[in-house]
């Protein structure tokens, strides 16, 4: 203790010399590292109080000597922990000498590289001892107690460093016990500061792991959702599509067969499933004495196109000749269908079959023609042709209100000369917006709709839509007194006259204004003289070209065979047991495609359907194709039975212009198909082919009427390829492979014309 007190009396310059000597011996660098106090957090500042046994003066003197030896700045900074050694050493106040302020780095001892080996040894040695000072036993004992108190607070790493310090350290035997106590308290090491640092690192790592997991989740969740969506579109939707195609294929027997006379058939969507439903005239045999026609009951039936179930049935007083749907009447939530018999025209709701209005006429001979709104009631009006049996040449045109069914005036008769079946009536709108009615017996004539309406209801009833005239058409009159304009008049009778519009054969029973718009403004395909086909230009009524062939037994089917944008004509003719199918170029009348088949012994129209390629697919009925390897007739006798030929098998073929030498056989039957129609399924880009057939029975009872629906996509998937050979080739193209053809047809989709 005396030594400590005597140090305070050493002169200032000697104390500086002593500090220089300590610095030289201990090799202390110019910058001293900050020492961390054990048990305190990094960066903390600790003001140690005087040790009760050593006193205040000894610490203050030593701090002043060491600080001056290290040449620390003499001005106290603003930050806590900066120490002014000069001021502190020169102060006479004991309390100022007690304030030993140490600033400890936040990242551990010696981390910034300022401390060298000498500094480490300085920290490892006994703090406060002056080199060269006399050792007193009592002082050594007290210093050992002081050292024990300091060393038990130092970090484990510092003690390890000191243990490696060549015998300069002395450690307390209580360290191991205190380390265990620190671990029991949850610290990372024996010191609180080190434990907090480790826990901080663990918490930071945990936060980073959670953050990375959240980022991964934000990335993976959209990827998984997108994958599920792709799987849903790739697997579930095709499954629903396949189920719909399966539902579109059905067959039902309705009533008795009426021979080969085609029944009334129309297509229109009435149940809102985007598939055109089937309307059919049915005759049922019965033993009921209350039947209207002996043992027959006549009715009109609506069938669902998806399942074939009966939507509604309407009993009629006579056979239904025509069914037309799509008339929009005010006050009706759904389009109206017309049921036309020989002497009655009835409008019914397309959804329920309930009667809206009806009108009685005599000897109706035609379908209803959709006219412009003549009464200005926002509902199109109708025109029907009647031909009384007792006055064969007096054809009458009757105007009917589409809203109420009332007759507009009285029927307008015409004394026609000629013979043959009735042509028309058809409505035509010229380029000037004038309306004309085309009709005739064996020939074709036109009369202005304005004249018909003025003669039926009076001149004062003409509306603004009928006041237009076309000077070009008016100049074609034979005389000013004549009401007729001759469209075709010759020695050969006219068989067919139809607008040159794609899909007209499938939509001719529609009363929709949009569907009828193109058909009223087009040129015409004219069939006359049994085997002549011409195209009439509507602007001047001149023939564009003429094609001659064998007798044509069905109306031509307009469709696109080549890519010139002009409609071509598919025609059929039969002679000597051979049916010949031909496609004539609509631009010049030359043959684009031809094939020969065994005569199917039926008369059925060809259907032309628009496809995704921009060309049309043609559906027609025939028997076996005739090639060089096949005979014209294919009949074989059953074993042991002479003269028992095999039944004639009729086949439905599909021909696409992309592969003109290949036909796709969709189905085959021994039934006699009498009429057909094509409906469309817009969502699936599919088409349904509806056929009405007469199926014979083994006994003498009348056969059944069979209605069958076929999905074209489903039929194509199961279809068989039939090659035409040399007779069907139109050029020297290479023979297409089976895989190539199957792939093309299975990717084919259909659309409305």
Image (tube, rainbow, N blue to C red):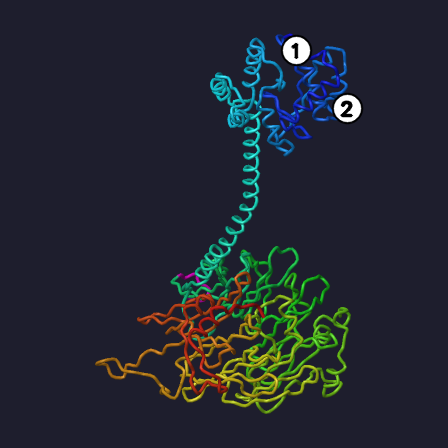
Mark pair 2, 1: CA separation = 25 Å
x and y percentages locating residue 463 in the rendered image:
76, 68
Q: Is residue 288 above or below residue 190?
A: below
Q: Which mark is residue 4?
A: 1
| First reached walking from the N terminus: tag 2 or tag 1 | 1
Outermost residue on the bottom side: it is: 491
Q: Residue at x 51, y 22 (%)?
A: 186
Q: Is residue 308 above or below residue 391?
A: above
SS at mark 2? loop
x and y percentages locating residue 116 in the rendered image:
62, 32
Q: Residue at x 54, y 43 (%)?
A: 217
Q: Residues within 10 Å of mark 2 (few under 14, many from 20)?
A: some
Left of 441 or right of it: where is 282? Answer: left
Q: Which residues fall within the magenta stretch?
A: 288-294
Q: Magenta: predominant secondary structure element?
A: loop
Which quadrant of the structure image shows residue 60? top right
x and y percentages locating residue 579 in the rendered image:
44, 84
Quarter of the image that includes the C terminus? bottom right
Total numbered labels placed on residues in the image:
2
Which quadrant of the structure image shows residue 644? bottom left
SS at mark 1? helix
Q: Residue at x 51, y 48 (%)?
A: 224
Left of 8 or right of it: where is 495? Answer: left
Closer-to-camera residue (723/118): 118
Q: Residue at x 65, y 23 (%)?
A: 22
Closer-to-camera residue (441/380): 380
Closer-to-camera residue (538/314): 538
Left of 541 or right of it: where is 351? Answer: left
Q: Is residue 451 above or below residue 109?
A: below
- Which residue in the protein does label 2 denote? 74
x and y percentages locating residue 106 in the rendered image:
63, 28
């Amino acid at each position: 203790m005396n030594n400590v007190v005597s140090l305070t009396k050493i002169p200032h310059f000697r104390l500086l010399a002593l500090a220089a000597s300590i610095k030289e011996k201990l090799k202390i660098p110019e910058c001293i590292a900050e020492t961390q106090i054990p048990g305190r957090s990094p960066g903390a500042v600790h003001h140690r109080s005087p040790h009760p046994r050593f006193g205040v003066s000894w610490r203050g003197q030593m701090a002043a000597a060491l600080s001056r030896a290290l040449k620390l700045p003499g001005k106290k900074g603003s930050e806590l922990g900066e120490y002014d050694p000069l001021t502190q050493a020169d102060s006479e106040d004991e309390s100022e000498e007690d304030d030993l302020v140490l600033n400890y780095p936040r990242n551990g001892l010696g981390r910034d590289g300022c401390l060298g080996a000498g500094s480490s040894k300085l920290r490892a040695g006994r703090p406060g001892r002056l080199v060269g000072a006399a050792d007193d036993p009592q002082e050594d004992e007290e210093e050992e107690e002081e050292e024990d108190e300091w060393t038990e607070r130092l970090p484990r790493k510092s003690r390890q460093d000191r243990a490696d310090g060549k015998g300069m350290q002395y450690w307390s035997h209580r360290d191991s016990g205190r380390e265990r106590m620190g671990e029991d308290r949850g610290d990372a090491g024996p010191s609180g500061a080190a434990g907090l640092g480790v826990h901080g690192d663990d918490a930071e790592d945990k936060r980073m792991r959670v953050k990375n997991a959240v980022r991964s989740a934000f990335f993976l969740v959209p990827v998984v959702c997108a994958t599920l969506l792709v799987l849903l579109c790739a697997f579930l939707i095709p499954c629903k599509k396949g189920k719909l195609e399966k539902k579109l294929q059905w067959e039902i027997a309705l009533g008795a067969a009426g021979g080969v006379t085609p029944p009334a058939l129309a297509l229109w969507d009435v149940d809102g499933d985007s598939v055109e439903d089937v309307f059919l005239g049915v005759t049922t045999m019965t033993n009921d004495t209350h039947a209207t026609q002996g043992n027959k009951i006549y009715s009109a039936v609506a069938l669902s196109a998806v399942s074939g179930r009966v939507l509604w049935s309407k009993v009629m007083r006579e056979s239904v000749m025509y069914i037309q749907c799509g008339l929009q009447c005010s006050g009706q939530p759904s389009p109206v269908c017309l049921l036309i018999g020989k002497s009655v025209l009835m409008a019914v709701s397309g959804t329920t079959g309930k009667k809206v209005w009806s009108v009685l006429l005599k000897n109706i001979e035609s379908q209803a023609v959709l006219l412009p709104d003549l009464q200005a009631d926002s509902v199109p009006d109708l025109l029907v042709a009647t031909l009384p049996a007792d006055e064969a040449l007096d054809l009458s045109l009757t105007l009917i209100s589409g809203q109420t069914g009332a007759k507009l005036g009285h029927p307008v008769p015409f004394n026609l000369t000629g013979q043959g079946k009735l042509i028309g009536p058809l409505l035509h709108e010229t380029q000037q917006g004038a309306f004309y009615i085309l009709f005739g017996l064996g020939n074709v004539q036109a009369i202005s709709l304005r004249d018909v309406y003025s003669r039926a209801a009076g001149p004062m009833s003409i509306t603004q839509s009928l006041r237009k005239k076309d000077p070009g058409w008016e100049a074609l009159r034979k005389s000013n007194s004549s009401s007729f304009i001759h469209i075709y008049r010759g020695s050969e009778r006219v068989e067919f006259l139809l607008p040159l519009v794609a899909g007209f054969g499938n939509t001719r029973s529609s009363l929709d204004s949009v569907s009828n718009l193109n058909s009223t403004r087009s040129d015409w395909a004219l069939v006359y003289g049994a085997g002549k086909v011409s195209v009439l230009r509507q602007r001047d009524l001149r023939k564009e070209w003429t094609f001659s062939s064998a007798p044509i037994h069905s109306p031509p089917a307009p469709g696109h065979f080549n890519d010139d944008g002009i409609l071509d004509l598919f025609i059929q003719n039969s002679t000597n047991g051979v049916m010949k199918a031909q496609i004539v170029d609509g631009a010049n009348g030359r043959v684009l495609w031809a094939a020969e088949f065994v005569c199917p012994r039926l008369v059925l129209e060809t259907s032309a359907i628009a496809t995704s390629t921009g060309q049309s697919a043609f559906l027609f009925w025939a028997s076996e194709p005739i090639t060089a390897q096949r005979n014209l007739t294919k009949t074989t006798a059953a074993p042991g039975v002479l003269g028992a030929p095999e039944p004639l098998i009729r086949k439905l073929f599909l021909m696409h212009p992309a592969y003109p030498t290949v036909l796709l056989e969709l189905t085959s039957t021994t039934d006699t198909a009498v009429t057909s129609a094509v409906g469309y399924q817009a969502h699936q880009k599919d088409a349904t082919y509806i056929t009405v057939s007469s199926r014979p029975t083994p006994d003498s009872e009348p056969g059944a009427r069979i209605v069958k629906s076929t999905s074209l996509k489903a039929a194509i998937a199961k279809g068989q390829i039939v090659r035409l050979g040399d007779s069907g080739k139109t050029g020297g193209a290479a023979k297409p492979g089976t895989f190539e053809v199957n792939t093309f047809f299975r990717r084919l989709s259909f659309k409305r014309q």
